[in-house]
Structure formats: C-alpha cells, structure tokens
C-alpha cells in the first residue's frame, strides 16, 4: 500500500503569494499522479485553506478532483470545520455527521483513522475526554488490521522549531498518547503543522511530520535550487516490515523534461492542473 501525504497548503486567494501556493499544490498533485507504482490514497493533514473561507476550499477541491487516488483530509488550526465539511460534503471522507471531523477508512490493508485536533480557541491542538472516547471507539471498531492515524498537530515534543509543545494543554497531548498506545494495532502516526519534516515517537509508535507543501511557508534550510520545489511524503506499507517513508521532491516548474513526460502520459489533466492553479488569483 502506498500513501502520499500532503500538508499545510494554506490556500488563500487574497495572499500576495496566492498563485505560488496554488501552483505548489497543483504540481504536487500532478507528481503524485505520476508515481509508479501509483499511490493508493492521498492523505491531507490540515491547514488546507489559510483562512478557512469557502472560496479557498472551492479552489482546493477543483485541484483535488484531478487526483487519480482518493483523497482523505484532517482539519488543521487554519481550517474552518463547517466550511471544510461543506466543501467536502460529497466526499466519503467527511460524510459522517459527527461533531468532530474524525473517521476511519476501511478500504485498504491498513485502516486510516483521521483525528480532529482543532480548537477555535488556539492555533495549538486540543484533545479533550470526548475526543478520546470517539477515537477509542474508532480504533476498537475493527480488531484485525493495522492502523495508521493521521492528524494535524504532532502529539509529541518537537525538538526542532520554536515551540516544542503543539497542544494547548500538556494533558491533552498525554491523553492522545495514551489512547493510541492502548492498541498494538496502531503502527504509525502522520502529522503536519510545524511546516518542516521531522519525526518522533509515542512509545514504540513512530510519528512522522510532513513538510509544508506551500514552498513560501516551508521551514528549514533548503539550497536555492530546492526553495521553489514542493516536498511531500510517500509512505509505503508492507505487511512484513510496516511503513517506510520517502521524502519526494516535486520537479521544478521549469523542468521541461519532466513536464513534457507528464503531458505525454496524461496531457489533459496536466493542462487542467495549470489552468486550475491560475484560476485561484482570477477567482
């Protein structure tokens, strides 16, 4: 099984770099479409639209409709729960009527469980007792498959960046750690939020944080030729070994060889991706 993870696109039609953010997402989706072997699923770990406005979610959805793999999303602190739910109302991932945007995906060898850690009171995460009960129920609903959990806020102390604690209350992070460790079937946690690639652990469970897809907002030191190239994570699962992760570098926008190869394989979607990206500013 292959999971492509993107995060922190911060689509915002009013931002000075709106075109670049949209182009980064469009190029990333085109790159995922070209993976060989193909991705089975795309996981989108939050901060999808910077201000949570419907118009920005509309643009995101127009780009995601070009993805060849199914897309599943978890909200980030910059997202608006209800606007996100409305934008994805026809998508299986947010069909539930739950208060939180938590759900399980049962279609793959690994169960995917999305966890909603958002609170309107803070940019940091929240995981109250009611969250814990809901996540426990999702984990316990099936007893055989391994589980990968995806959420926006990293539930461990992040030793890179300005703030090691990404939950408003330390006890919330501890509560989340306790819930995911109750089942030995939880084998990985995938997150975003800190805008850089990093990793940690919850007990024996690896936690991987994807970099910010929006290159203008990405943290970390990148050489000049990498500064406008989006990076996303590709997680490969094999039953005998668990997950392995690759940081996938998207081709440069001026890379004619890669662009022409993409167009030769699938010319119409490549052209539509560029058109949809440019429509963000016009919209």
Image (tube, rainbow, N blue to C red):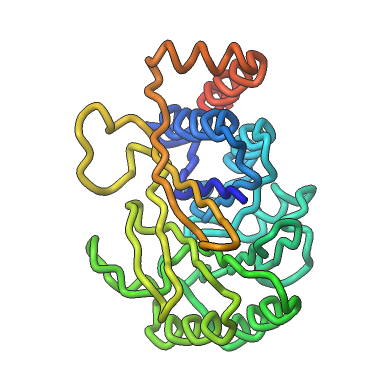
Q: Position of residue 156 (x, y in %)?
A: 37, 74
The quadrant in which residue 98 appears is bottom right
The answer to whether residue 46 is above or below residue 255 is: below
Q: Position of residue 36 (x, y in %)?
A: 57, 32
Q: Position of residue 270 (x, y in %)?
A: 59, 19
**Side (left or right) of 193 relative to 75:** left
**Side (left or right) of 150 relative to 253:** right
**Which residue: 52% across, 79% down?**
127
**Side (left or right) of 147 relative to 108:** left
Camera-side residue of 191 and 234: 234
Furthest residue in direction front, as rendered: 240
The answer to whether residue 209 is above or below residue 273 is: below
**Which residue: 45% across, 17% down?**
258
Count every numbered label the image shows and give the total.
0
**Which residue: 62% across, 51% down?**
1
Q: Position of residue 177 (x, y in %)?
A: 47, 82
**Which residue: 66% across, 65% down?**
101
């Amino acid at each position: 099984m292959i999971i492509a993870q993107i995060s922190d696109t911060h689509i915002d039609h009013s931002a000075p770099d709106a075109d670049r953010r949209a182009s980064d997402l469009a190029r990333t989706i085109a790159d995922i479409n070209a993976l060989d072997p193909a991705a089975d699923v795309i996981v989108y770990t939050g901060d999808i639209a910077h201000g949570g406005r419907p118009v920005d979610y509309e643009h995101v959805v127009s780009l995601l409709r070009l993805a060849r793999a199914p897309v599943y999303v978890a909200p980030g602190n910059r997202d608006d729960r209800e606007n996100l739910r409305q934008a994805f109302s026809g998508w299986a991932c947010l069909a539930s009527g739950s208060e939180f945007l938590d759900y399980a995906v049962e279609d793959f060898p690994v169960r995917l469980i999305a966890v909603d850690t958002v609170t309107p009171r803070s940019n940091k995460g929240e995981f109250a007792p009611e969250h814990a009960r809901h996540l426990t129920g999702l984990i316990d609903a099936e007893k055989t498959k391994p589980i990968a959990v995806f959420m926006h806020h990293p539930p461990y102390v992040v030793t890179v960046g300005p703030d090691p604690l990404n939950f408003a209350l330390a006890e919330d992070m501890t509560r989340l750690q306790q819930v995911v460790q109750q089942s030995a079937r939880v084998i990985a946690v995938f997150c975003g939020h800190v805008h850089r690639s990093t990793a940690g652990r919850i007990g024996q469970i690896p936690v991987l944080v994807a970099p910010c897809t929006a290159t203008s907002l990405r943290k970390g030191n990148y050489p000049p030729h990498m500064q406008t190239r989006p990076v996303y994570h590709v997680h490969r699962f094999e039953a005998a070994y668990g997950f392995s992760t690759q940081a996938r570098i998207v081709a440069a926008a001026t890379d004619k060889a890669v662009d022409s190869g993409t167009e030769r394989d699938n010319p119409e979607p490549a052209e539509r991706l560029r058109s949809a990206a440019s429509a963000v500013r016009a919209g």
